[in-house]
Image (cartoon, helix red, strand yellow):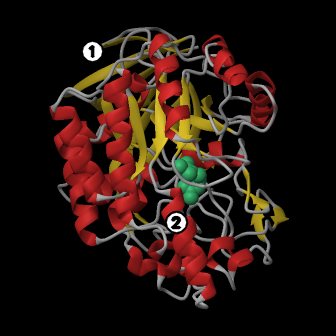
């Protein structure tokens, strides 16, 4: 079927202009004016903005953790993403089996219900010669990225020997190492001391994960990147000092890039001290207003290249069911840590919230321009992760993943508005101006206002290409 999106204002990472988009076979055929195709379905976008579908480079669907499981799966999380204007997600595969292939296959099985397009990163949480030898095989599976951790001692953490080895292999095969930057030893010591002193409430999560751990881990990774001559992408950056370290390294030609997430732009440690502070528990934790400000600046200046969500939702009270698509569901959540902050599942909802929140409180608030909004949320993640120009672009030949954005629509946002499968929303009651009106995935209309037209199994796995550019 041929579709024409007519008379919209196209917003790309570089430009804004009036044009029509001609779509056929799931692809953008042409961008121009006055297409005359008899029988084409015409979608009127006058008065609206037209942008590429969002690419969220950081999600955790159906992830077993802390004795429970993240509460969105690869269907509910995808549906929520689509309502927020995101049409591609990249999820992290846990290294749960002896080989990468087995671990990846398990994730493919989970993702059979996908409703938007998706790809995978591999969590590299062990290292030995056999596993090192298998890393290049991931490229053949379409996985070109490895996440390493300097925290979560004895569970996920790698030492510097292993990280350096991963960097060198990644360099040789055009892959990219992603870093979770915190100091696992400091956290282990401080958390044990806090519990021994009887400190069990959520704010101790932040107090026992000091920001300096993130700063020095970022610098150490940048130094290793320089020595391995391999790129590093620092995920969920949360500290002003991390931005400074990245800037320092980039000024010296070190190939480092960074991502932050909306939660680190708006919230602080003080939110953890609320009665419902467990809602804000994730790792790394929220920091201070000064950190929020520096992260905004890092985005606007280009020191940071992307905004991901680190969507890893849990119920606030997993003993009380919610209704999702007509059925009751309750999944154990934050209440698991009601008498011990170290047992609160780490993670937050956000996959739907990213674009609407960043439009109203990023673009409209003057922190970033509309072009930067598209670059950070759509185009840069697609480029860095080897999906461009199939994704993240409004170019002839690109997948017709398109958001028609109503810049005037006002929404009082919150859990009632969200399709994320959890019982709370971080942005409850926030007044938004600007919201997705229609969302297309490969030319198919999957969200029309409040109506869900997407389907379980309608998403496709995206094999990513190695050798993606450094931004
Ligand atoms: O608290 C978080 N961020 N949970 C997800 C896992 C991670 O480290 O990204
Ligand atoms: Zn992480
Ligand atoms: Zn994460």
Tell me the residue at 27%/15% (across/down).
33
Query: Is 305 rendered above or below residue 38?
Result: below
Alpha-carbon distance for marks 2 and 1? 58 Å
Secondary element at image label 2: helix
Tell me the residue at 20%/41% (across/down).
247
- Camera-side residue: 232 or 126? 126
- Name the residue that disc number 1 marks: 33
Which labelled disc corresponds to residue 187? 2
Query: Is 401 rendered above or below residue 288?
Result: above
In the rendered image, residue 28, in percent from the top left (x then y), is placed at: 44, 14
Q: Quadrant of the N terminus?
A: top right
The mark that comes first in sequence, 2 or 1, is 1
- Camera-side residue: 161 or 4? 161
Query: Is 348 rendered above or below residue 39?
Result: below
- In the picture, residue 370 is in which quadrant? top left
Decide if residue 191 is on the left or right side of residue 94.
Answer: left
In the rendered image, residue 205, in percent from the top left (x then y), is placed at: 53, 74
Can residue 432 be seen by looking at this rendering? no
Mark 2: few/some/many CA within 10 Å (<14, 14-19, 20+): many
Query: Is 283 rendered above or below residue 133?
Result: below
Tell me the residue at 36%/43% (across/down).
220
In the rendered image, residue 412, in percent from the top left (x then y), is placed at: 44, 69
Decide if residue 219 is on the left or right side of residue 183.
Answer: left
Q: Quadrant of the C terminus?
A: top left
Decide if residue 333 is on the left or right side of residue 236.
Answer: right
- In the picture, residue 14 is in which quadrant? top left
Secondary element at image label 1: loop
- In the picture, residue 326 is in which quadrant? bottom right
């Amino acid at each position: 079927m041929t579709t024409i999106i007519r008379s919209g204002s196209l917003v790309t990472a570089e430009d804004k202009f009036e044009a029509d988009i001609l779509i056929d076979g799931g692809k953008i055929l042409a961008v121009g004016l006055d297409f005359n195709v008899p029988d084409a379905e015409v979608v009127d976008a006058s008065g609206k903005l037209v942008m590429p579908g969002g690419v969220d480079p950081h999600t955790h669907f159906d992830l077993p953790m802390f004795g429970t499981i993240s509460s969105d799966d690869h269907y509910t999380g995808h549906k929520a993403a689509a309502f927020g204007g995101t049409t591609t997600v990249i999820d992290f595969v846990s290294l749960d089996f002896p080989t990468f292939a087995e671990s990846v296959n398990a994730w493919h099985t989970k993702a059979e219900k996908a409703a938007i397009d998706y790809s995978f990163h591999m969590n590299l949480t062990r290292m030995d010669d056999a596993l090192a030898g298998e890393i290049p095989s991931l490229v053949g599976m379409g996985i070109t990225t490895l996440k390493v951790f300097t925290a979560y001692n004895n569970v996920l953490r790698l030492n510097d020997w292993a990280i350096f080895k991963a960097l060198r292999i990644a360099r040789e095969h055009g892959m990219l190492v992603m870093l979770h930057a915190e100091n696992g030893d400091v956290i282990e010591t401080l958390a044990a001391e806090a519990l021994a002193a009887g400190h069990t409430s959520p704010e101790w999560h932040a107090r026992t994960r000091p920001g300096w751990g993130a700063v020095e881990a970022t610098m150490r990774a940048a130094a290793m990147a320089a020595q391995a001559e391999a790129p590093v992408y620092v995920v969920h950056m949360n500290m002003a000092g991390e931005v400074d370290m990245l800037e320092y390294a980039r000024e010296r030609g070190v190939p480092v890039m960074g991502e932050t997430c909306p939660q680190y732009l708006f919230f602080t440690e003080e939110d953890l001290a609320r009665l419902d502070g467990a809602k804000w528990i994730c790792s790394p934790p929220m920091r201070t207003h000064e950190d929020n400000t520096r992260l905004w600046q890092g985005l606007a200046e280009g020191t940071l290249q992307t905004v991901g969500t680190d969507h890893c939702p849990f119920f606030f009270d997993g003993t009380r069911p919610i209704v999702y698509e007509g059925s009751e569901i309750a999944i154990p959540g934050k209440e698991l840590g009601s008498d011990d902050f170290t047992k609160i599942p780490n993670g937050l909802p956000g996959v739907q919230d990213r674009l609407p929140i960043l439009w109203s409180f990023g673009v409209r608030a003057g922190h970033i321009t509309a072009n930067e909004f598209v670059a950070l949320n759509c185009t840069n993640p697609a480029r860095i992760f080897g999906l461009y120009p199939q994704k993240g672009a409004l170019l002839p030949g690109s997948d017709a993943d398109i958001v028609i954005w109503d810049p005037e629509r006002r929404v009082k946002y919150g859990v009632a508005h969200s399709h994320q499968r959890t019982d709370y929303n971080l942005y409850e009651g926030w007044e938004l101006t600007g919201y997705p009106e229609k969302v297309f995935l490969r030319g198919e209309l999957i969200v029309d206002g409040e109506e869900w037209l997407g389907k379980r199994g309608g998403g496709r796995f995206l094999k990513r290409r190695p050798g993606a550019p450094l931004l």
